[in-house]
Every structure is written in structure tokens, then in C-alpha cells.
Image (tube, rainbow, N blue to C red):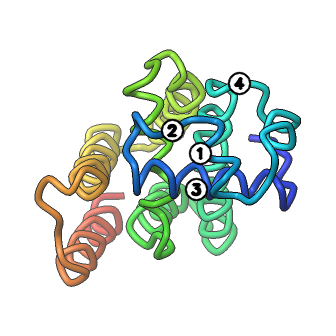
Amino acid sequence: MNIKRSPTKTLLIRSANQVILRDGVQGLTLEAVALEAGVSKGGLLYHFPSKDALVVGLIEFYIAQFEDRLRAHVNDAEGPKAWMRAYVLASLSPPPDEFDVSAGLIAAAALNPALLDPLRERYDAWQAMFDQSAHTALARVVRLAIDGWWVTTLLALAPTSDHDRAALQNILLTLIEESL
């Protein structure tokens, strides 16, 4: 994903996330984001000409951050297990603000589910990488386990401890090592 990450765009995206986290999706207005970022509404509109464009920017920012981590882990490994291991590590070792940054995903789903299309496209690409594995069933289990952890954590449904997250990561990495 080639998202231009200017300091101002990053500030606006992080500000939009803060507005969502503080005021909920209904509080996400261009005025609120501009105020949070300390820029004029015109300055915001220069980078994001509409609320939908801002939400798409939130999603693209999240995807770009995840794919940066994914690439870093892939570059650290070789062989057919490398991509699956990288996905586990990139997913289950997120930076501290990961779920703050992903607040835009909730906004997109609530405001206009079609705005999630860039994420759907990336999921299709990630699934295609899993499908290249010699053990497709294991690959699906790994991805679905990670997705389940991620969604429950994002929505605070039944958040796990850091210990539980680390245990899940170890179990998945062991399954990958022993099965491939």
C-alpha cells in the first residue's frame, strides 16, 4: 500500500482516532478533527476533502502500519513458513497504540461499510499468501485465531492479558513449526 505519510496527514489521522476514541463515531466531524489537530478546517480539507476520505485515510494508515511490521518480520525469516510466522508476529506483537490507530475501522464500519473495501482487498491478498502454504487448513486456523483475538481485543469483548496473547503467539508459532 502506497500511502503518502506526511507529518500533517499523520497528525490528522491520529487526531481523528482520538476524536473517535473520546467522542465515539458520532463525534467524528471534520471540525472536531481539525480542532483536535490544531489546524484549520481548510488545512484538513486540503489533505482529506471529505469525511469519507478521512476514514479511508485512517484505514490506509492502519494497513500501511501493519504491512510495515509484516515486511520486517518476513525479511527476518526464510522458507515456506516465513510468511505465516511473520503474520503471527506482526499481528500478535502490535505497538502500544495499535488499537487506537484501528479506531478508524470501527468508524468505517459504522459510517459506510463500503469504506472497508481497501481492508477487504488487503485481507484477500493476505489470505492468498496463506493459501500458498503447503498446509492450507493450518493457515486458515492461524489466520482465524489471530482475527478472533484481534476483534475481541479491538471491541473489548473479552480482552486477553499480555500473558494470554504471548501464549497464543507461542502456540501458533509451534503449530506452524511442527506442521510444515
Query: Dot 2: what SS?
Result: loop
Q: Could you say where residue 56 lies in the image, as x and y percent from the top left?
A: 63, 32
Q: Nearer the viewer, residue 161 or 51?
A: 51
Q: Residues within 10 Å of mark 2 (few under 14, many from 20)?
A: many
Look at label 4 and name its amino acid: Ser
Q: Nearer the viewer, residue 54 or 64?
A: 54
Q: Which residue is mark 1?
A: 32
Residue 148 higher or lower than 175, as above or below: above
Q: Do callouts 2 and 3 mark residues in contact (Cβ within 8 Å)? A: no
Q: Nearer the viewer, residue 171 or 105?
A: 105
Report how far apart the C-alphas of labels 1 and 2 lie in the structure.
7 Å
Q: Which residue is mark 4?
A: 50
Does residue 95 appear left or right of residue 6 in this picture?
Answer: left
Q: Residues within 10 Å of mark 3 (few under 14, many from 20)?
A: some
Q: Could you tell which of marks 1 and 3 lies nearer the N-terminus?
A: 1
Look at label 2 and name its amino acid: Leu
Q: Do callouts 1 and 4 mark residues in contact (Cβ within 8 Å)? A: no
Report how far apart the C-alphas of labels 3 and 4 lie in the structure.
25 Å
Residue at left offset 80%, top offset 53%: 39
Residue at left offset 20%, top offset 77%: 167
Q: Which residue is mark 2?
A: 28
Look at label 1 and name its amino acid: Ala
Q: Do callouts 2 and 4 mark residues in contact (Cβ within 8 Å)? A: no
Does residue 56 appear left or right of residue 174 in this picture?
Answer: right
Q: Quadrant of residue 29?
A: top right
